């Protein structure tokens, strides 16, 4: 082996100990990025021409190959992420379920948006041509795995599943926080590609620390769109890069959100203690490392608010944290919570247990009032992890003022009882302008993979609030419409021919 | 009246003579932009809450008010644009028809994308919440009128109609090339707002020369999206501005396209002369001032190609041009065609008549071969007006090479006979990757307002190839999804309640 064949390598880091884990993985080169993009481009026309059944079976085969990895996958993901077994087993189920959902979406065909406006040769003053519309995939998609969901938002996660469902080849940049998990899943996808006879470049994969590979991927002229879940800084950098290309491309980045929860007066009065306990369970789940973690609580002063805070403080104080995902995330959490603790307008209500202190950080809960909150926009910024801020508001108008000043959010939640309904109804138009999902009497953590789910919201919760990264509507991100005018039947795409099955609008009417 | 009340004014310019036309119109100020955006923002919640029938009736009322302007509108538009009466009468019909189409779209309700995933309280291991999804409007939209369609792509054009249909208030920046037409239509819309009892800020309007007003409009934090039809330079400037905002917003800019037409061998052999005549009729219509003007012809060498060129040259040589829209457009055309005429790899085939020479420019037709074309990317750039370039290609492979090197296009056309079908079918995947509409045996000018139309294409033909600016799908540009989780029925939007009428997916299945 010559010296030029020896690539630098990197290793995963055990979240719980900070120690490197074997084996070492070779760091991809810029030539690898180029080769993956070239292969994806070469595969595009053949892959997008696959019929619905073949593409659906391919998605299901990816799920089967992931399941076939067995316990080894879960064990490796536990080691790298510090997440517990039950959570990762559930996340694997969700990942496989998501692939199955998109298999069903591909078969059902609504995503094709077939529209046929038949010719009107006798129309006056001018005849109308035969017009037929369908959606086609954008082209090869670059997907960036996320650290906090090593399975469901990573190598074979929602971005990959929806892009493949749309007919786009995918090039994944594996997250360097879980290279072993990433490698196992990438190989599983590759086996599904081969087993299903898909073109070789349908799935590509590069890995390594640092930003250079990802930047090269987003700048590659053959990449047509980007999916990303991660920090605001990372997402904004990708947006800038994508916009500065000679041909700009869409970036679907899911970034940051504090997910406001409004506690209405009757609910507080009736069940302040239960709300406090439920809130802390949602806040501390997975050490708070969820995009939909409830980082902001707006509580209307009155009966029950003290019970809420007391119950939350008691629950939090006894909470033993899990390790955080990476040292970088842990440091950012520590810095963010220290800033809150030292803020003149903020008071700490409770602090959880330290855990082992090597890889853990205590959960923390703070409080301020609406005036304090409105006085400093920084108080509305996300602290990724199990930290939250309770803002005491005098009344509903003050809640509205606080909400109107917030940035775009993934979710917004109302905790209410029947007596709150009239007031809560006033909040709905305010909340839906600021969030992609509005919940009543639930907690925002936990995102169902379903047809009616929206996991996306106005900037900066995502780069593009017109989209969702979870649920079947996520496929729309990777499609664009094409109209075929007076095209002979033999040249038309099969789904646009007369008599083709599948949902369609004919002259705007379902047929 | 104090000095500060006296705004600067500007006048329209008669396209045919270059002379100013009375009356003078006051130039809007930055305070006017601010006021229009404030009013639009204030109107947003009330306007988006209007029901389908009220909103549809409002769109129809705008059409009625435009028709009620009578001949005066056509006469003013003729004077300002230099376009002939028949064209503008047709364009008015199209504008009113477009408003009616969107009234029907609003009533039909597919745009709401209603999805309901009912609760599954008994699901194991976790229950599923009740999830309901609908589309909501983005917010106030800034619309920039286009010079080349003073009615159909201007003040009450497709962008305005589709944004209003979506539930977005609209602030129009009228095109300074037709301030009188713009004023009449803006007043008609305003009358419809009042007649239908819509909130006062549903429609706003500013006008003036220069870029300052438009820049202020796009930068205003209350503006949520932009519609634009015009030059590539203008569109790119708006894209940069929108991306550099603290909260970036989508820009739907329709910019430039050369609309390649491929002449297949059997078609050329069978009807080279007729193709030449049909081509020149499409090229010279409206002095070629269409986004879909056929600016590039790829002809496969063989029988008929000489007949095509000879017929095109003969038709073009006798063509008397209409005035061009503005002096600026005329100068850009003259510069672009002179560059082609002086290009070492290009030869002029024909030049039309000069017209009066004050406001007209002769139509011009050039030719080169594939090697010459591929040798200079500038030959693929749009010259707005009745100029086209015939590229002689040795065979289908050379056609594909040329097509693969092209930028994104609004349209691509195949002229073929039955004997060409196998070869033409090979072109479809190539063309659909580069264009939003693929036509067979037609000419790209003439864009039907229909459900299956796509008037949009990959960058730089538009800023966002995932969208269309013509046809009912254009409404999707101004919508985003929101999910309502476990929301009590009384708080749900009416269209999401149990038993509500309208198209929907329940668990992903039409119901």
Image (cartoon, coloured by chain):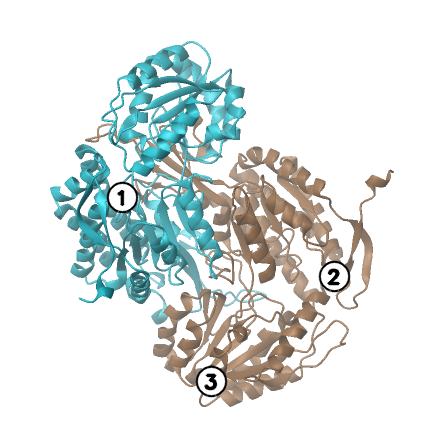
Chain colours: A brown, B cyan
Residue A457 visible somewhere in the drawing = yes
Q: Is residue B378 left or right of residue B476?
A: right
The dot on residue B46 is: none
The Cα atoms of the two marked residues, 2 and 3, are separated by: 40 Å
Contact, CB < 8 Å: mark 3 with mark 1?
A: no
Q: Which residue is mark 3?
A: A268
Can you name the residue that lies furthest to the top here? B303
Can you name the residue that lies furthest to the right here? A1
Contact, CB < 8 Å: mark 1 with mark 2?
A: no
Q: Which residue is mark 2?
A: A80
Q: Which chain does the numbered disc 1 sit on?
A: B
Quadrant, the N terminus of chain B: bottom left
Does A174 sit above or below residue A339?
Answer: above
Does A158 sit above or below residue B466?
Answer: below
Task: Give the quarter of the image for residue B268.
Answer: top left
What residue sits 75% from the left and 58% below the top?
Answer: A76
Which sits earlier in the primary sequence, circle 2 or circle 3?
2
- Helix, strand or loop for disc 3: helix
């Amino acid at each position: 082996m010559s010296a030029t064949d020896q690539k630098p390598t990197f290793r995963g880091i055990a979240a719980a100990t900070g120690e490197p884990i074997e084996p070492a993985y070779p760091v991809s080169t810029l030539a690898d990025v180029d080769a993956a993009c070239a292969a994806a481009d070469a595969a595009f026309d053949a892959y997008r021409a696959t019929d619905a059944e073949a593409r659906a079976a391919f998605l299901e085969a990816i799920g089967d190959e992931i399941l076939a990895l067995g316990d080894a996958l879960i064990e490796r993901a536990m080691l790298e992420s510090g997440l517990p077994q039950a959570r990762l087993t559930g996340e694997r189920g969700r990942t496989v379920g998501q692939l199955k959902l998109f298999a069903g979406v591909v078969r059902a065909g609504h995503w094709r948006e077939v529209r046929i406006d038949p010719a009107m040769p006798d129309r006056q003053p001018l005849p109308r041509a035969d017009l037929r519309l369908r959606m086609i995939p954008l082209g090869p998609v670059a997907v960036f795995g996320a650290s906090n969901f090593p399975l469901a938002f990573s190598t074979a996660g929602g971005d990959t599943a929806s892009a493949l469902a749309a007919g786009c080849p995918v090039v994944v940049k594996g997250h360097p926080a879980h290279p072993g998990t990433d490698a196992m899943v990438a190989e599983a996808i590759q086996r599904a590609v081969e087993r299903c006879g898909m073109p070789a470049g349908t799935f590509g994969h590069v890995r390594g620390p640092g930003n250079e590979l990802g930047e090269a991927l987003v700048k590659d002229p053959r990449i047509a769109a980007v999916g990303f879940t991660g920090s605001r800084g990372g997402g904004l950098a990708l947006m800038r890069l994508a916009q500065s290309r000679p041909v700009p491309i869409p970036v679907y980045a899911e970034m940051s959100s504090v997910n406001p929860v409004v506690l209405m007066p009757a609910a507080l009065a009736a069940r302040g203690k239960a709300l406090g306990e439920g809130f802390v369970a949602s806040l501390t789940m997975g050490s708070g490392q969820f995009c939909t973690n409830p980082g902001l609580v707006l509580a209307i002063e009155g009966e029950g608010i003290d019970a809420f805070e007391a119950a939350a403080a008691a629950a939090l104080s006894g909470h033993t944290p899990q390790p955080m995902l990476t040292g970088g995330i842990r440091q950012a959490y520590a810095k963010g919570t220290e800033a809150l603790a030292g803020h003149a307008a903020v008071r700490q209500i409770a602090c959880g247990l330290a855990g082992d202190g090597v890889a853990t950080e205590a959960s923390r809960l703070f409080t301020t009032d609406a005036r304090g909150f409105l006085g400093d926009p920084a108080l509305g910024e996300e602290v990724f992890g199990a930290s939250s801020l309770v803002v005491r508001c005098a009344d509903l108008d003050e809640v509205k003022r606080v909400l109107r000043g917030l940035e775009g959010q993934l979710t917004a939640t109302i905790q209410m009882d029947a007596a709150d309904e009239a007031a809560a109804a006033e909040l709905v138009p305010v909340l839906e302008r600021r969030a992609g999902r509005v919940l009543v009497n639930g907690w925002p953590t936990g995102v169902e993979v379903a047809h009616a789910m929206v996991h996306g919201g106005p900037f900066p919760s995502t780069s593009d609030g017109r989209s969702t990264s979870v649920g079947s509507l996520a496929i729309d991100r990777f499609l664009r419409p094409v109209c075929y005018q007076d095209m002979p039947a033999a040249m038309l795409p099969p789904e646009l021919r007369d008599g083709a099955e599948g949902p369609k609008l004919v002259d705007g009417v379902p047929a």
